[in-house]
Amino acid sequence: MTDSTGTPTTLSNIGVVMFTVADQDAALAFYTEKLGFEVRGDMRFGEHDEARWLEVAPPGSRARLALNPPRGGQPGGSAIGVETTDVLGEHARLKAVGGIDIDPEPMRTPGAPLMFMLRDPDGNHVVVVEAPPAP
């Protein structure tokens, strides 16, 4: 792939998506305890270690989700999509976990895969979508 100057891009992967959260510890608990994500990074930085970089991801995922405190704005309002080969099973699992703001049932719209949405405690949206068939 080339850009508008005709130079080939060296970009090859979405590495980190960032959500703004009000409380990093509460967000960490939600994503690890409720959704089953794993911690990929948790470190302090800055002159006096006042900032915290926190990353989580589904097991096996190359992309990570950074959970950041607000910087001049309000938390929430972002969205990511995650894939599964078993939308119905994952919906049932998450409903059974409890404490998750989740759509009542998965839906399929014409031309779109089976999917449902859930919202984290800060109002960020996670769209759980049926993975496309392997080529």
Image (spheres, rainbow, N blue to C red):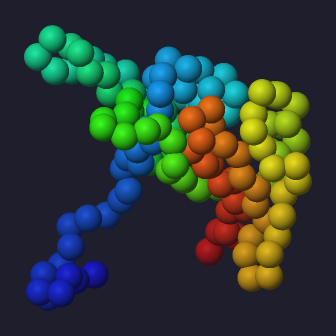
Q: Position of residue 11 (x, y in %)?
A: 26, 65
Q: Residue furthest front?
A: 73
Residue 1 shows in the view: yes
Q: Is residue 82 above or below residue 76?
A: below
Q: Is residue 113 above or below residue 90?
A: below
Residue placed at 41% from the left, 48% from the top?
Answer: 17
Can residue 59 be seen here? The reply is no
Left or right? Give the position of 93 relative to 127: right
Q: What residue sits 11% from the left and 86% below the top?
A: 5
Using the image as rendered, state which of residue 116 and residue 131 is in the foreground.
Answer: 116
- Percent x, y of residue 2: 22, 83
Which image quarter: residue 18?
Answer: top left
Percent x, y of residue 48: 15, 11
Q: Quadrant of the C terminus?
A: bottom right
Name the residue located 46 percent from the left edge and 37 percent from the top edge: 75
From the viewer's perspective, is 34 left or right of 60? right
Q: Quadrant of the N terminus?
A: bottom left
Q: Residue furthest top?
A: 48
Number of numbered callouts drawn: 0
Residue 102 at what x, y percent from top left? 78, 43
Q: Quadrant of residue 14?
A: bottom left
Instruction: Pick whichever, 85 or 42, lies toward us.
Output: 42
Q: Residue at x 46, y 23 (%)?
A: 24
